[in-house]
Amino acid sequence: MTTPVSYEVQDGIAVITIANPPVNALSQAVRAGLLEAVARLAADSDAIAGVITGAGRIFVGGADITEFGKTPQPPYLPDVINAIEDSTKPIAAALNGAAIGGGCEVGLGSHLRIASETARISLPEVTLGLMPGAGGTQRLPRLAGVEAALDIITTARQVSAAEALSLGIVDAVVPAADLLSAAKDKVRAVAEGSVSRPVASGLRPRPVAETSVFEAARKKVRARNRGEVSHLAAIDAVEDATRMDRTEGLAAERKRFLDLMQTPQRAALIHAFFAERKAAQVKEIAGLTPPPYASTGVIGGGTMGAGIATAALLAGLPVTLIEREEAFAEKARSTIARNLEGAVARGKLSAEQHDEILNGKLTTSTTYEALAEADIIIEAVFENLEVKTDVFRKLDAIAKPGATLATNTSYLDVNAIAAVTSRPEDVIGLHFFSPAHVMRLLEIVVAEKTAPAHVARAFDLARKLGKIGVYSGICDGFIGNRLMMQYRLASDYTMMDGASPYQIDAALTDFGFAMGPFQVSDLAGIDIGYASRQRRAPTRPPEERVVTFADGLYHRGWLGQKTGRGFYIYDEQSPKGRPDPEILALLDEARKEAGIIPRSFTADEIQRRYMAAMINEAARVLEEGIARRASDIDTVLLTGYGFPRWRGGPLHYADTVGIASVLEDIKRLSADDAYFWRPAPLLVRLAAEGKTFADLDAGEAV
């Protein structure tokens, strides 16, 4: 069996190489190999120093994800890194690429750190509900200072080699081709005494910082990461570094790390991590190579169309954008230019790349014939079936054989759109979320006759665009919007029954949602909700309770943020909105007209109602086969609808609180509205069998 850690003496320097593809993860075998290599170096009379590096283009990509959730096996990473730091012979880390999590900590424990120009370091543990657990919170502040360490650890951001050098995290940055020789030269100079041996980072003096620095960091993460515990634990650990020596600080860090391992948040975030990766595993396309594609077409240059075009351009795809008139095409080009300027401001593009993309990759036209050679054509016109079918009739006439014809619809029947073409097998739904060049979710809506090749191409496009593609079947609203309709109805009912929209929004943001439902309505536009209700009216079940309060706002011209007034008032003093007393008065009138005697609601009641409605409908979506797995539903809500990631998604949350408990809430609520609160059969079955949605995904609840 090939060992994942090799040891080779080159000119008196032991080169220790980690080769554990694809990312050189710190598996048990790698940890054992590193520990053995350090011991071998100590006893090797032919080697005066060592260099640790990674095979390929990555130094170390962090923990081994196959070990997540399992009992850690020795040797433990903190012990391995302590052995590196305590080596009597100097050891340099040659950072040949990404040094992530434990990989960064291996570097921090080495006596020297030499980075290639393309190297990046990061400590992303907080994104998994954890914190650095192998010395990161103790060594980084001793090297870079407390404020830099707090920023790097609590944001989980990547630090470039140049920034790492400026912060004192690495000792030198060299071209990739010179990395190994430079690392050997520098560590040899230390071993031979021509350069003073650096004090090991863990043994440096305790860093100094005022208490106010830590309080400011806590205030920032409480606002940015509402409800999450790992960020606060990491701040506490960095503060420990200011008052503890290495031994005490590492012990305190390890205890905090192991405590976090037992939290529901860690389990939820690990679930979210794996759910995103499973989403692309679709049985119909298993082993299928997606047809190649080199160019894209976008029809419609509004906010959505321009966003889709921007996403494709940022991914390196040439785009031809079609608009009805030249003036609209120029407006779309301006929107795309602004989007690209945003990418420049965020450091995603250089100014030169911005100009190259805008002038060399983007073409606009007013004729469909310009799309004749496009491999993927995405329609992004007004959400109206007649308008969209007209577009697809035109595409059918000009698109080349085998082109993927995609509709960006939020609700409409993709089967009906495909039916107007002579090639329904080429038609698929691609539901982007606005802003399309920023939002990570892409619902891939597979119609009755969509060919697997186009499904494979759609998932590959999602990957290329940096998005998470999730398979969806056909129904009104697909996965996400179908659920949203139900939990939005629950909010409307709760409002009419006595809670204010502001109380509801506050309860749900306290739960962890990015925004409450009425804040979302104002952001999207009251007119959008009105149009959706009008569209559904002819097919609305007669048993469904109808709340028309928001229709009154629409008729008043209170359309939300775009008009300065909706459920909230928006002005210079309150750009994010403030409660409107007139809304409360109008609600009182509406309740009287409906004969409703308002009652009070606690925040807990509001949250339980909202979640019960969401989980109940999610169970129907799963049972009907609209979603393929429970974790896909979680991914949709997490990446497209602001569900708190640290709760894992609605169905993971249901498993956490207990399906029987959720079902009990639904049955109790059904006394007031038997139609809306009718329990999903799948929910009833899982509760009766004592099974979970995770069991269902694992094939254990069939």
Image (spheres, rainbow, N blue to C red):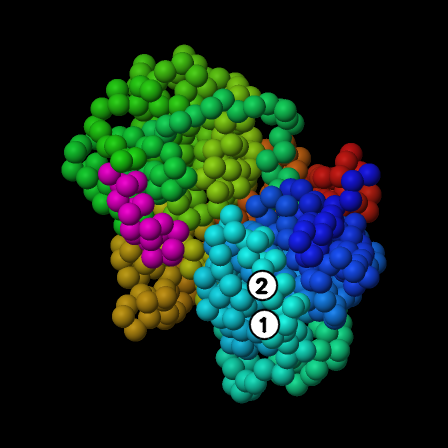
- The residue at the point 69 percent across, 62 percent down is 49
Residue 145 vs residue 699: left or right? left
Query: Does the CB distance between marks 2 and 1 fall below 8 Å?
Result: yes
- What secondary structure is marked by label 1? loop
| Residue nearer the viewer, 191 or 280 | 191
Is 110 above or below relative to 281?
below
Kindly tell me whether residue 167 is visible in this rendering.
Answer: yes
Image: magenta residue range: 341-359
Q: Amino acid at mark 1?
A: Val
Residue matched to label 1: 195
Residue 598 vs residue 362: left or right? right
- The residue at the point 51 percent across, 54 percent down is 116
Q: Position of residue 673 (x, y in %)?
A: 60, 50
User: What is the quadrant of residue 377 in the picture?
Assistant: top left
Secondary structure character of the magenta stretch overall:
helix
Kindly tell me whether residue 530 is visible in this rendering.
Answer: no
Q: Which label was assigned to residue 186?
A: 2
Residue 407 vs residue 362: left or right? right
Q: Position of residue 464 (x, y in %)?
A: 47, 37
| Residue nearer the viewer, 253 or 638 | 253
- What secondary structure is marked by label 2? helix
Quadrant of the rendering where the N terminus is positioned: top right
- The residue at the point 39 percent across, 37 percent down is 316
